[in-house]
Image (cartoon, grey):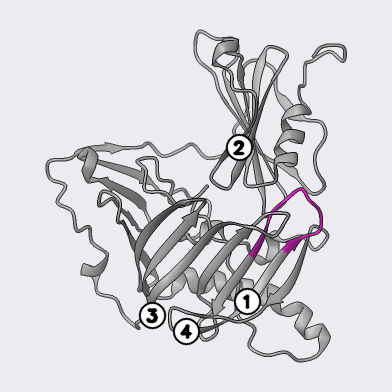
Amino acid sequence: MPVSCRPDWQPLQVVAGLLLALPGLGSPAAAAEAPRAMLERMANAVEYLNYEGTLVHLHGGDSSVLHITHQVQDGQVTERISCDDAGRQLIRNNDEVTGIFPDQHAVLVEPRDDRGQPSSPLRGRLPGAASIDDALYLLSFAPPERIAGRDTRGIVIRPRDGFRYGYRIWLDRATYMPLKTQLVDERDRVLEQLLFTKIVLPERIPASAVRPTVATGAFAVRRAARAATGPATDQAGPQWSVTALPPGFRLTVRKAQVAPDALSGLRHIVYSDGLATVSLFVEPAVAASEQAEGLSQIGAANAYTTSIDGHMVTAIGEVPARTVEMFAESARSLERTPASR
């Protein structure tokens, strides 16, 4: 999902597909290996370098500006992200994420999960070396640019078919920090862009630079419970699956939210090819007048909704329209009879 300053701002869903500069080309074989090595360096740079900067996020006709201060001290990461819209802020450390919403006089505190090392909101959307399947994506190099006063080198992640989007990324030549990222569609049109207009990378950042700058004493504070660990499973009603998957997509998550007085509730199924992700939502169909079937667009994401077996099925993801349509139209209940539709 795109960078947002809305109350439901998801810190780990910042759009930023970012890569790294190539230190030097050697043999053809060495050059072919370079992009993956740079992805690993990029991931470390985003998480474990000190930096302060201004990010501009462009999507469609909209734009937003974020100010990021990222501090690493004694192996502990603390980060403050401020949004120009309504003065909202997000503070992240190793244990929790705090969202501050002055326009609503509210604070939301969410515990960090235990599934891995601390992750920057930027890193949460970066393609890792292991996430890119050579059978699905082609890595190549883009012409260098000078961005935020720094020299860069660029990399292109180009899909080998029309079922997924690609990226163009420029990274600081000296530090491997991603400075500019573009999400591009199957026609090579830019759907979204994330750009550092200013950035500094000091050796140390004081603790005061990552503290909230908004007085929250009078705000309502809501603390979210820590999510249960382990895979989610359906407890009632039929399970659903996609019967015609585009190449490379695999089931990664299956969740169910079942109301006590209902035979079946909302089901959320996630498929990924390692880089692109599609979510499938299945819920009991609402009245026909309330359904919005067909294709719709939300920022860089496409969504496709249809009715199947008395349920409303929606597929959504930052992928081409044909992909979400294929997911939604081929969704089937695992208890469905072959003749039903």
Mark 3 or mark 1: which is in front?
1
Instruction: Give the structural element (helix, strand or loop) at label 2.
Output: loop
Q: Give the residue displayed 47% in from the left and 84% down from the top.
A: 150
| Spatial separation of the CA atoms under disc 4 and disc 1 | 13 Å
At label 3, the amino acid type is: Leu
Of 330 and 37, the residue lying toward us: 330
Give the residue at mark 1.
Answer: 154
| Spatial separation of the CA atoms under disc 3 and disc 2 | 39 Å
Mark 2 or mark 4: which is in front?
4
Mark 2 or mark 1: which is in front?
1
Mark 4 or mark 3: which is in front?
4
Numbered badge on residue 231 = 2
**Label 2 crowding class (10 Å Cα cut-off): few <14, some 14-19, many 20+?**
few
| Spatial separation of the CA atoms under disc 2 and disc 1 | 38 Å
| Spatial separation of the CA atoms under disc 4 and disc 3 | 11 Å
Of 119 and 99, the residue lying toward us: 99
Of 16 and 51, the residue lying toward us: 16
Looking at the image, which residue sits at the far right?
Answer: 338
Residue 242 sits above or below residue 216 on the image: above
Q: Which range of residues does the magenta coloring cover?
A: 158-167
**Label 4 crowding class (10 Å Cα cut-off): few <14, some 14-19, many 20+?**
some
Give the residue at mark 3.
Answer: 201
Give the residue at mark 4.
Answer: 150
**Label 1 crowding class (10 Å Cα cut-off): few <14, some 14-19, many 20+?**
many
Q: Give the residue displayed 84% in from the left and 13% down from the top.
A: 337
Apparent side of residue 130 relative to residue 231 in the rendered image (left or right): right
| Spatial separation of the CA atoms under disc 3 and disc 1 | 20 Å
Residue 311 painted magenta: no
Would you say the residues marked 3 and 2 are in contact, meaning their CB atoms lie under 8 Å apart?
no
